[in-house]
Amino acid sequence: MDPIELKRTRVIMHADHVSSVSGIDFPQNFVGMEDDMAWNFEKFTKNFNIVISKVQGDNLEFDLIGVDSSVANAFRRCLISEIPTMAIESVFVINNTSIVHDEILAQRLGLVPIKADPTEFHFKSPDEDATDLNTIVFKMHVKAKVNVSKAAKAEQGDIIADDNTNVLSKHLIWAPQGDQEERFADNPPRPVHDDIVLAKMRPGQEIELELHCYKGIGKEHAKWSPVATASYRLLPEIQILSPIIGNDAVKFQKCFSKGVIEVFTNGDGEKEARVVNSRKDTVSREVLRHKEFDGKVRLTRIRDHFIFNIESTGILPPDVLFLQSIQVLINKCQTVKEALTELTGDVMEVDE
């Protein structure tokens, strides 16, 4: 590969450092080249691609190809902090005789993901009253008591299990307001998971609460973030520059994660190493520690190929979240265009 092309398109891994970290694709950076590196829409559409590799429950993995790291990071940030959801914001404590302090209990309740379509609600301003269009109400009333049937059978010294020892997210009961019962008859608001432990009680202790959920975004508080994780990594690339054969091939294979390197028998009947799935490589650089592989292998990462992972909290499917993050970024671009038009007085087209 041409040295300039290598620097343009790859991040190069060395034994003790990483080189070509920053992109160099900007106009007139290299004089005399046929490609002046100016951004071109036709070239972008030719190179851009999204390949979905895994969809499993609340997890989505896909390849984002042909974009700069700034764009990939913009999607990641939008996923974490810009997509609205519904979360518990106000907790009205009627009675709490458990050992969990009111403030701690409220904080734990706020982090319970609520399964509700945020597009059906408005943002509630601080001076606005709660209505059926901006608020979801839950109620909780749990009292711990001795399990009488178990107590009757218990022998002296036995520990008797109590009813409602664990206060769980399933104890949050939706209280419809206005016409919410009709609007959400097919998909009532509820916790995503029923088995989240909120508190533990002993017989005689009681918790009675009223909880209000509002619409918000992760930028304001993490409880509104719709993702547990949203991350990306560059696609690893392993280039074998000269054949690795014999016992070195077996040693070479052991330097990588399982499934990355395969040892096969070549035409001369010798063992030889080849790359079968560089995607599985963790880029540990273990191979670069061994002198026998000097000059035989190059470890790189493809600069514009991102392996993107989205793990939803369960409020919205991960594919829907990514589409919403794209729309958030489009809206931001439109805002910038409109602001520039106002500033310069020039008329700019804003594509939908």
Image: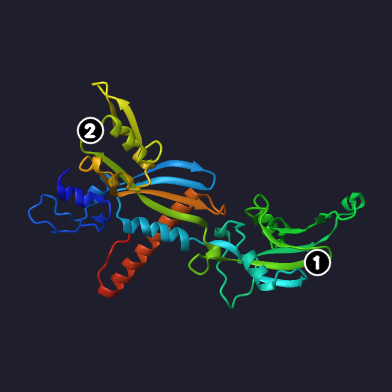
Tell whether label 1 touches label 2 (CB within 8 Å): no
Residue extending furthest toward the left: 32
Q: Residue at x 62, y 53 (%)?
A: 192
Residue behind mark 2: 243
User: Dot 1 lies on which element?
Assistant: loop
Query: Mark 2 or mark 1: which comes first in sequence?
Result: 1
Indicate whether 56 appears above or below 82. Answer: above
Q: Quadrant of residue 181?
A: bottom right
Q: Quadrant of the N terminus?
A: top left
* Front-lying residue, 349 or 154: 154
Between the residue at mark 2 and the residue at mark 1, the CA separation in whole angstroms equals 72 Å
Q: Residue at x 32, y 59 (%)?
A: 70
Indicate whether 88 appears above or below 252. Answer: below
Residue extending furthest toward the bottom: 127
Q: Amino acid at mark 2?
A: Pro
Q: Position of residue 157 (x, y in %)?
A: 87, 56
Q: Position of residue 116 (x, y in %)?
A: 60, 56
Direction from residue 37 to residue 343 in the image, left or right: right
* Front-lying residue, 30 or 213: 30
Residue behind mark 1: 205
Q: Quadrant of residue 265?
A: top left
Q: Residue at x 67, y 70 (%)?
A: 91
Q: Quadrant of residue 160?
A: bottom right
Direction from residue 194 to residue 297 in the image, left or right: left
User: Dot 2 lies on which element?
Assistant: loop
- Residue 164 got which mark? none
Q: How is the image coloured?
A: rainbow
Instruction: Please identify, in this view, whether the residue under mark 2 or under mark 1 is nearer the observer.
Output: 2
Indicate whether 167 appears above or below 54. Answer: below
Direction from residue 48 to residue 148 in the image, left or right: right
Can the viewer see residue 348 in this picture?
A: yes
